């Protein structure tokens, strides 16, 4: 089973929010200096699921990401964990896009990779929490898409997915190829072994640009315009309600709530 896993490099979510800053003029999050970005957590779960399927059924796992040269570290980690190959899409016109841009670039890269049976993605990224790219991939490639998935079983000529819903789970069967957006319940990602880390250090990662993917014609231009990115300011205040008796305190509290139009 040949599997493609899409991966995103994100700011480390364990960094306390107080250390993040926003460049409102550029519309970008500025992570603290000296803290390296990491592989998106749900994408790591998707990679783990792909590696388990490869171990059970054979095949090949290819990791693909869209990002700058710094994203090589995340792809090398994927190779260290057990991916057979990795591809970096690096083009400034694509990096500054939206979910549509990302999904289009990944779809074209997947088509360029060639034969595949299954595409696994994380259900969403920890930096935006949008969860749009996996669904966009399915739409662009014309493939059945299931999200969020917590278990995957290979069937005769297809695949069975356990999909999480509000009050339980659904079991859905789909023909291959298909796209699945994986949730963390599918399993904890493994730690890269020393041998894998050494292999990743020698791995050659090809870099594809918009021209390589046939996207230098503007067909992956973003559909969404970011109007403003800012840190919400929150103010807290505490006011004590006086009164000689519980009844007076309750009446005074009710009056203040009415004035604030809360009741």
Image (cartoon, grey):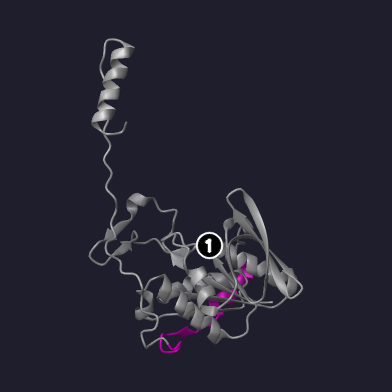
Position of residue 44 measured from the top left corner of the image (x, y, whole percent)? 56, 64
Which quadrant of the rendered structure holds the N terminus?
bottom right
Instruction: Tell me which residue sits at (27%, 29%) in the image.
Output: 258
Note whether residue 67 is visible: no
Does residue 229 appear to the left or right of 1 in the view shown?
left
49 in relation to 112, above or below: above
The single residue placed furthest to the top in the displayed view is: 244
Instruction: Tell me which residue sits at (53%, 86%) in the image.
Output: 112
218 in relation to 56, above or below: below
Position of residue 89 measured from the top left corner of the image (x, y, whole percent)? 45, 80
164 in relation to 261, above or below: below
Q: Is residue 207 magenta?
A: yes
In terms of image quadrants, where is residue 197?
A: bottom right
112 in relation to 187, above or below: below
Position of residue 83 measured from the top left corner of the image (x, y, whole percent)? 61, 74
Q: Nearer the viewer, residue 5 or 111?
A: 111
Which quadrant of the rendered structure holds the C terminus?
top left
Dot 1: what SS?
Answer: loop
Does residue 108 appear to the left or right of 246 in the view shown?
right
Q: Which residues are magenta?
A: 193-214
Position of residue 84 measured from the top left corner of the image (x, y, whole percent)? 62, 78
Q: Is residue 78 magenta?
A: no
Is the residue marked by circle 1 packed among few (<14), some (14-19), or many (20+) residues within 10 Å? many
Q: Which residue is mark 1?
A: 123
Numbered label tally: 1
Note whether residue 121 is visible: yes
């Amino acid at each position: 089973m040949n599997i493609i896993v899409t991966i995103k490099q994100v700011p480390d979510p364990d960094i306390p929010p107080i250390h993040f800053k926003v460049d409102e003029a550029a519309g970008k999050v500025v992570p603290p200096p000296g803290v390296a970005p990491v592989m998106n957590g749900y994408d790591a779960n998707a990679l783990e699921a792909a590696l388990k399927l490869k171990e059970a059924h054979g095949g090949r796992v290819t990791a693909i990401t869209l990002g700058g040269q710094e994203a090589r570290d995340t792809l090398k980690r994927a190779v260290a964990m057990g991916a057979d190959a990795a591809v970096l899409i690096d083009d400034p016109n694509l990096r500054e896009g939206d979910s549509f841009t990302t999904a289009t670039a990944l779809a074209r890269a997947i088509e360029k990779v060639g034969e595949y049976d299954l595409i696994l993605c994380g259900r969403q990224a920890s930096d935006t929490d949008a969860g749009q790219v996996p669904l966009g991939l399915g739409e662009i490639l014309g493939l059945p898409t299931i999200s969020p998935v917590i278990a995957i079983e290979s069937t005769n000529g297809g695949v069975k997915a356990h999909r999480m819903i509000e009050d339980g789970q659904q079991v859905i069967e789909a023909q291959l190829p298909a796209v699945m957006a994986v949730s963390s319940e599918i399993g904890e990602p493994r730690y890269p072994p020393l041998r894998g880390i050494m292999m990743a250090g020698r791995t050659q990662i090809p870099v594809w640009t918009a021209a390589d993917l046939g996207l230098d014609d503007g067909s992956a231009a973003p559909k969404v315009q970011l109007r403003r990115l800012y840190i919400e300011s929150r103010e807290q205040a505490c006011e004590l309600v006086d009164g000689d008796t519980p009844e007076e305190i309750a009446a005074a509290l009710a009056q203040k709530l009415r004035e604030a139009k809360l009741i």
